Image (cartoon, rainbow, N blue to C red):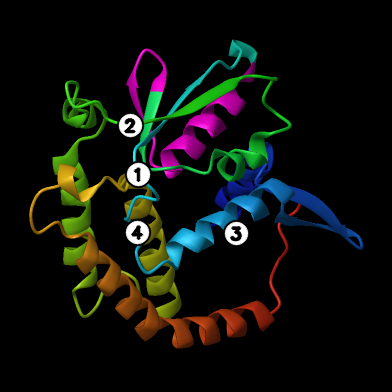
């Protein structure tokens, strides 16, 4: 990445609260913010999970929220956090997720930014006379979720990928895996088609990660040991 693009990216991530500036003698560096560290720790659990697409618990979790117009950035972060946890907007500001979502952990990085009582959440179960299957189709495009899995499988089943080195390939793998994790809301199996591809995606991810990890870490360590131009504040 060229220096101007690097500086712009660092500035954007700092404004978004993911990085913070730190002084290193006479230079300025960047480190993860406390909120970003929490997000990464929580994300790592799902990234490395053996069954990351299984819903946790039964029933449904529903959320509605009200964030002032002046807090657009907070609203965006809240929506992103809900999406990562498998929520999708159903109707009229009501968000739906399968299973029992741990909202305390999911929204902890936003605790200081949200006004009191901004978020209301509750658990729900299906009523026989009012099946939730129609709502699932309204909230999520199941065909598109399958397509995301099939694209991941197609891409990473090849012997060589678009990237040049094992480190670059490893980064691409993780990026594609994170994108897939965000795309799949962990719906119960009864709402999915037969031969659902999530298990193949998981097996392929862990296989390719194991194949690339050792060389990628060695290349990263070698690159980190070389002197480089610091990005100025």
Q: In the figure, 36 relative to 15: above or below?
A: below
Q: Is residue 46 left or right of residue 190?
A: right
What is the span of residues highlighted in magenta in the rendered image?
Answer: 71-94
Q: What whole-number distance in Å separates the C-alpha atoms at marks 2 and 1?
A: 8 Å
CB of mark 2 within 8 Å of CB of mark 3? Answer: no
Question: Dot 4, crowdedness within 10 Å: few (<14), some or many (≥20)?
Answer: some
Q: Is residue 92 left or right of residue 227?
A: left
Q: Which residue is mark 4?
A: 176
Q: Quadrant of residue 60?
A: top left
Q: Which residue is mark 3?
A: 41
Q: In the figure, 113 relative to 199: above or below?
A: above
Mark closer to the chain start, 1 or 3: 3
Which of the labelled discs sits on residue 125, or is there none?
2
Q: What whole-number distance in Å separates the C-alpha atoms at marks 4 and 1?
A: 28 Å
Q: Which residue is mark 1?
A: 58
Residue found at x 16% / y 50%: 147
Mark closer to the chain start, 2 or 3: 3
Mark closer to the chain start, 4 or 1: 1
Task: Between label 4 and label 2, give the one nearer the viewer.
Answer: 2
Task: Between label 2 and label 3, give the one nearer the viewer.
Answer: 2
CB of mark 2 within 8 Å of CB of mark 1? Answer: yes
Which of the labelled discs sits on residue 67, or is there none?
none
Q: In the figure, 90 relative to 40: above or below?
A: above
Q: Quadrant of residue 11?
A: top right
């Amino acid at each position: 990445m060229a220096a101007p693009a690097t500086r712009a990216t660092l500035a954007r991530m700092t404004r978004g609260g993911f990085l913070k500036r730190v002084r290193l003698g006479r230079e300025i560096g960047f480190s993860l913010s406390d909120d970003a560290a929490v997000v990464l720790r929580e994300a790592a659990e799902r990234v490395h999970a053996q069954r990351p697409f299984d819903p946790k618990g039964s029933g449904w979790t529903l959320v509605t929220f009200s964030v002032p117009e002046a807090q657009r950035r907070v609203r965006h972060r809240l929506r992103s956090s809900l999406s990562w946890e498998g929520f999708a907007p159903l109707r009229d500001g009501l968000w739906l997720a399968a299973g029992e979502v741990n909202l305390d952990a999911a929204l902890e990085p936003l605790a200081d930014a949200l006004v009191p009582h901004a978020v209301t959440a509750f658990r729900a179960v299906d009523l026989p006379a009012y099946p939730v299957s129609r709502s699932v189709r309204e909230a999520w495009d199941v065909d598109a979720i399958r397509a995301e899995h099939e694209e991941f499988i197609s891409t990473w089943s090849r012997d060589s990928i678009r990237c040049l080195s094992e480190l670059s390939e490893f980064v691409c793998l993780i990026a594609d895996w994170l994108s897939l994790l965000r795309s799949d809301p962990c719906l119960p199996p009864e709402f999915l088609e037969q031969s659902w591809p999530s298990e193949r995606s998981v097996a392929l991810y862990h296989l390719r990660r194991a194949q690339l990890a050792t060389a990628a870490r060695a290349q990263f360590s070698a690159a980190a040991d070389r002197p480089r131009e610091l990005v100025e504040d």
